[in-house]
Amino acid sequence: MSVKIGISPIAWQNDDLPDLTADYTMEQALSEAREIGYTGVERGRRMPQETEALRAYLEKYDIALCGGWCSGNLLINDVETEKQAVRQQVRQFAALNAPCIVYAECSNTVQGDIGTPVNNRPKLDRDAVKAYGLKLGELAKWMADEGVPLAYHHHMGSFIEDGEDIDRLMEFTPKEVHLLYDTGHLWFGGGDVLGTLRKWRERVLHVHFKDVRPDVIRDVRDNDKSFLDAVIAGAFTVPGDGAIDFQPIADELKAMDYAGWIVVEAEQDPAKAPPYEYSKKGYDHIVEICARSGLTIESRS
């Protein structure tokens, strides 16, 4: 069994804060990521939209599509409406052999609103999450039939943010609703980073390695700042550059025979954290801890 190491281009090309990364191109992101050693990249909005154009674009840089974000609106949509909204992405990801769609509910999230404190994120009661879970299970089964699994992204600023939220969502959804396990969002949300992985190991399909800077997060929490404020201030960084100990996480991935993607997703201000330098630091750290854990890293043929 082996893992694959991918990266989100968000360090070079931040879709939520485009002015922050205006000096960088997507071409630079893919070229440098591949030079470092990453073999996959998650989809960015500034990549070609049409499927065959995207295939050619990725092939040019010898890099695979290792997933990508999907902004869900299932809380306000019925299942059939949501299927229509995401159908093109599902078909594209299936055609390009992506391992999953990274799905998160965005109809009521505050993650993209720089004027709203992340502390004011929406919360749903147990019955509302149960109703949502029924719809999400239906959507996930349809996606699986279409050839692409759904991996749910617990995310700061959303109603699925901390460990309790994850527990409830997993409780009320079938096995077709997989979990994207994100270390940085879990830490920021106050969850048990290693404990959540152990608890839901059977549901984890996709992994984001994101490190954190606790002093920045404390400031954001204490002073009612937004999620985007947190990103700009450097709440996140690459593995090995923050407070999270990734070795026991890698050990647990080995113990559970994880054979999917480990994706570095560390959005920062590139003026403070040069993308190539930091992305290489993250890659090297993953290689080091995987070697200690006995996790084999698959190279691109």
Image (spheres, rainbow, N blue to C red):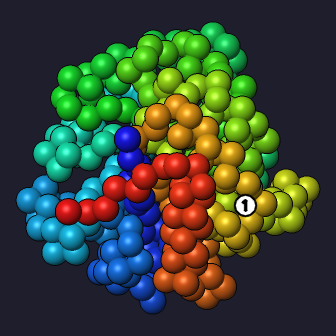
Residue 98 percent coordinates (x, y): 26, 46
Q: Residue at x 8, y 59 (%)?
A: 52
Q: Residue at x 74, y 55 (%)?
A: 244
> Which of the 4 quarters of the picture holds residue 63?
bottom left
Residue type at mark 1 is Val
Nearer to us in this view, 204 or 17: 204
Q: Judge whether 260 appears above or below 221 on screen.
A: above
Residue 246 percent coordinates (x, y): 67, 53
Residue 93 in sight in this render: yes
Q: Is residue 37 left or right of residue 179?
A: left
Residue furthest to the left: 52
Secondary structure of the residue carrying tag 1 is: strand
> Which of the 4 quarters of the picture holds residue 130?
top right
Q: Residue at x 32, y 32 (%)?
A: 149
Which quadrant does the C terminus fall into?
Answer: bottom left
Which quadrant does the N terminus fall into?
Answer: top left
